[in-house]
């Protein structure tokens, strides 16, 4: 079991490395940072659309999902509910996973990118 996990991890990291070589890593990291509720660029459209472009998201859908996510957060903030971390934000949106399909694809990209950056 451990060997298959290692092979999967190495293979997955290789795919990530190949995908992002030659890409503008700064744009990717800004997009990842924009998914964090602590960030001043939280849910800003420009960096998230750039991240979406690198992960081949449907940018039109992503743009609509970002708008609706901001509206949902504003409504929930009125009752004192606000995610404080990326993990809490993912948990907050989990019940709407199918509705925010493109946004959840970014979470997947973000978690892989953070893992990959930590290994450098």
Image (cartoon, helix red, strand yellow):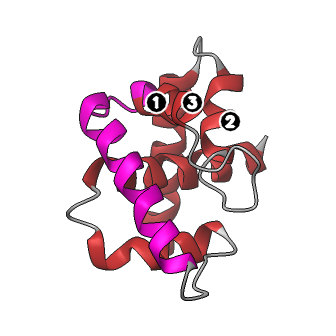
Taking the image as shown, residue 73 lies to the left or right of residue 114, namely left
Q: Is residue 83 above or below residue 112?
A: below
Pointer 2 residue: 29
Pointer 1 residue: 49
Q: In the rendering, at what x and y percent does residue 111 appear? A: 56, 55
Can the viewer see residue 105? Answer: no
Q: In the rendering, at what x and y percent does residue 21 appear? A: 59, 18
The quadrant the C terminus occupies is top right
Which residue is at 76% across, 48% downward? 40
Can the viewer see residue 16? Answer: yes
Q: Which residues are magenta?
A: 53-77
Taking the image as shown, residue 52 lies to the left or right of residue 20, namely left
User: CA gap, disc 2 to disc 1?
Assistant: 12 Å
Helix, strand, or loop for circle 2? helix
Upstream in sequence: badge 2 or badge 1: 2
Q: Nearer the viewer, mark 3 or mark 1?
A: 1
Q: Is residue 73 above or below residue 100?
A: below
Q: Which is more toward the observer, 60 or 27?
A: 60
Pointer 3 residue: 17
User: CA gap, disc 3 to disc 1?
Assistant: 21 Å
Q: Is residue 111 above or below residue 120?
A: below
Q: Nearer the viewer, mark 2 or mark 1?
A: 1
Helix, strand, or loop for circle 1? helix
């Amino acid at each position: 079991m451990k060997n298959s996990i290692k092979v999967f991890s190495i293979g997955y990291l290789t795919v990530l490395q190949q995908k992002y070589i030659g890409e503008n890593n700064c744009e990717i990291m800004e997009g990842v940072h924009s998914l964090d509720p602590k960030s001043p660029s939280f849910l800003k459209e420009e960096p998230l659309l750039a991240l979406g472009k690198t992960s081949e998201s449907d940018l039109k859908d992503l743009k609509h999902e970002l708008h609706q996510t901001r509206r949902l957060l504003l409504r929930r903030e009125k009752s004192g509910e606000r995610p404080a971390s990326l993990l809490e934000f993912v948990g907050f949106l989990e019940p709407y996973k199918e509705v925010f399909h493109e946004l959840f694809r970014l979470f997947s990209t973000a978690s892989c990118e953070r893992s990959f950056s930590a290994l450098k």
